[in-house]
Image (cartoon, grey):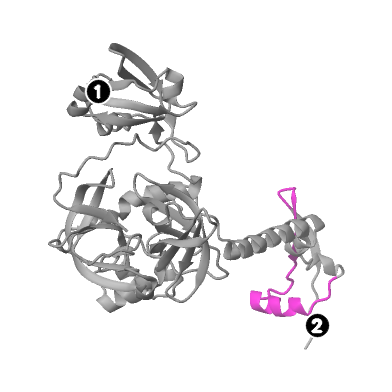
């Protein structure tokens, strides 16, 4: 085969672009041209092929870029580890676990959690309800110290574990006056408990125990959805510690019962599930295994049966949250007096007007700063006639901390108006949460007791 000769020369196009052209002297076709072009020898090889610089590779070799990428990767790894191991404290207003947390912590399946939280239809059998809820119900033993420094049993009751870190709710009357409190679980654990705070008005107290391991806690329900006739289950410690973990079953007999118990007006759930001394502070449950009430009291008598009462959990939640967060119930106003209701009979016998007799005043309180004195008789508040302590408290509770409240008093036969600047009730206050009232026989034909 003869060697073909061709010349390469530069040709100017548009006076600005240099291109390489090939002079074809013998009329070759393009395919032949390409084949022989590959075997041609060029005087300037770089003019045929010049590799492009690998800019991306050089970019990642830049020290600044390497430092930035390393920093980003390090930060992402740290945040990932932190988010996995860190469990933030519950913020105020949400210090109680959310629906499903209790069962999730105990390792129950998503199917059971959905039933328990109402995300899917269905309820549990009574044995399943007991298995779910009973580990969170505890026995509370209280002791008082006598004058002779001898520990004596004061009371026993029940409680409900609210969080895995050991917060427990019970009734105030269970722990009232106790010098030491012991909490025993159904699993056989025993703890010394710290009293975090109490609320006499709602008969609620919160305790705290320290445990090396997370404790099983209760699933809280919604008492506003209750209907009369629904199944209700009570778990607690009736009579004595040996009967701890007792389950009784009944129905919701009534809701929103307004009851006066131990001088306090309370809204209660009524149930015929058996509640006995020692059940106070225990759990009232629905068929999803959720706590819908805190068992508090029952009526007693030789001819009375099946009248038990529980604090609705929706009313208890904000009280519990405030006690856990602040140690007391915030936002409540207090006048700072103790008083006695002056009935018509007492008024006639003592030459006093009908109203509320001021029996004592707390130093530094709103009443003290406003100039109220012992012996004054409150006859009206904010222009409304008040003949009982409950009437005074009802008007007081419509106000907020810092509000002005005008109190009309009778002082030695002289009518006066006194303006109070209401203060917040705090546990350090020596004044009672509300004016005390002389005992008057209950108009109800049977007695109410709380255990």
Looking at the image, is mark 2 or mark 1 earlier in the sequence?
2
Other residues around mark 2 within 10 Å, as few (<14) / some (14–19) / many (≥20): few
At horizontal 37% and vertical 46% (from top left) the residue drawn is 200
- Mark 2 sits on what residue? 3
Instruction: Depth check: give the residue in front, 271 or 1.
Output: 271
Quadrant that contains the N terminus = bottom right
Q: Give how far apart the Cα atoms at labels 2 and 1 are.
A: 144 Å
Q: Position of residue 3 (x, y in %)?
A: 80, 82
What segment carries the magenta color? 13-42
Compare residues 414 and 380 and report the one nearer the observer: 414
Classify 164 as above or below 335. below
* Quadrant of the rendering where the C terminus is positioned: bottom left
60 vs 133: above or below: above
Find residue 246 and report its image quarter.
bottom left
Q: Is residue 381 visible?
A: no
In the image, which disc is placed on residue 39?
A: none
Task: Name the residue rendered at 32%, 74% in the picture.
Answer: 130
Identify the mark at residue 350; answer none if there is no mark.
1
Extreme-top residue of the structure? 414
Q: Secondary structure at mark 1?
A: helix
């Amino acid at each position: 085969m003869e060697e073909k000769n061709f010349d390469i020369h530069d040709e100017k196009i548009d006076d600005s672009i240099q291109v390489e052209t090939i002079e074809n002297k013998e009329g070759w076709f393009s395919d032949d041209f390409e084949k022989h072009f590959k075997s041609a020898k060029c005087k300037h090889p770089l003019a045929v092929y010049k590799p492009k610089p690998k800019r991306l590779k050089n970019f990642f070799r830049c020290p600044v870029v390497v430092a930035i990428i390393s920093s980003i990767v390090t930060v992402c790894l740290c945040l990932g580890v932190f988010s996995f191991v860190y469990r933030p404290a519950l913020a105020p207003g949400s210090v109680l676990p959310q629906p499903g947390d209790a069962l999730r912590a105990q390792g129950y399946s998503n199917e059971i959690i959905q039933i328990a939280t109402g995300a899917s239809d269905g309820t549990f059998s009574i044995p399943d309800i007991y298995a779910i809820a009973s580990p969170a119900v505890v026995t509370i033993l209280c002791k008082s110290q006598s004058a002779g420094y001898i520990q004596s049993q004061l009371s026993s009751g029940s409680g409900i574990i609210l969080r895995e870190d050991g917060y427990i709710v019970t009734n105030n009357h269970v722990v009232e006056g106790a010098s030491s409190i012991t909490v025993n679980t159904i699993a056989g654990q025993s703890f010394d408990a710290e009293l975090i705070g109490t609320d006499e008005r709602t008969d609620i107290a919160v305790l705290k125990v320290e445990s090396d391991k997370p404790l099983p806690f209760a699933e809280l329900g919604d008492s506003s959805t209750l209907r009369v006739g629904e199944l209700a289950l009570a778990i607690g410690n009736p009579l004595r510690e040996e009967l701890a973990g007792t389950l009784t079953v009944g129905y919701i007999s009534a809701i929103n019962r307004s009851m006066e118990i131990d001088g306090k007006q309370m809204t209660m759930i009524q149930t015929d599930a058996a509640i006995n001394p020692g059940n106070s502070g225990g759990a009232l449950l629905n068929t999803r295994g959720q706590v819908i009430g805190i068992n508090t009291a029952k009526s007693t008598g030789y001819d009375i049966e099946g009248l038990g009462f529980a604090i609705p959990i929706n009313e208890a939640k904000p009280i519990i949250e405030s006690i856990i967060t602040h140690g007391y119930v915030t936002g409540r106003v207090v006048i700072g007096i103790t008083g006695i209701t002056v009935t018509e009979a007492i008024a006639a016998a003592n030459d006093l007007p009908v109203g509320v007799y001021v029996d004592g005043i707390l130093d530094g309180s709103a009443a003290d700063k406003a100039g109220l004195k012992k012996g004054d008789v409150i006859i009206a508040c904010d222009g409304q006639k008040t003949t009982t302590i409950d009437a005074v408290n009802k008007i007081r509770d419509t106000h907020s901390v810092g509000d002005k409240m005008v109190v009309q008093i009778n002082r030695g036969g002289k009518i006066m108006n006194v303006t109070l600047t209401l203060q917040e009730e705090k546990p350090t206050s020596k004044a009672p949460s509300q004016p005390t009232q002389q005992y008057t026989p209950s108009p109800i034909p049977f007695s109410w007791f709380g255990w």
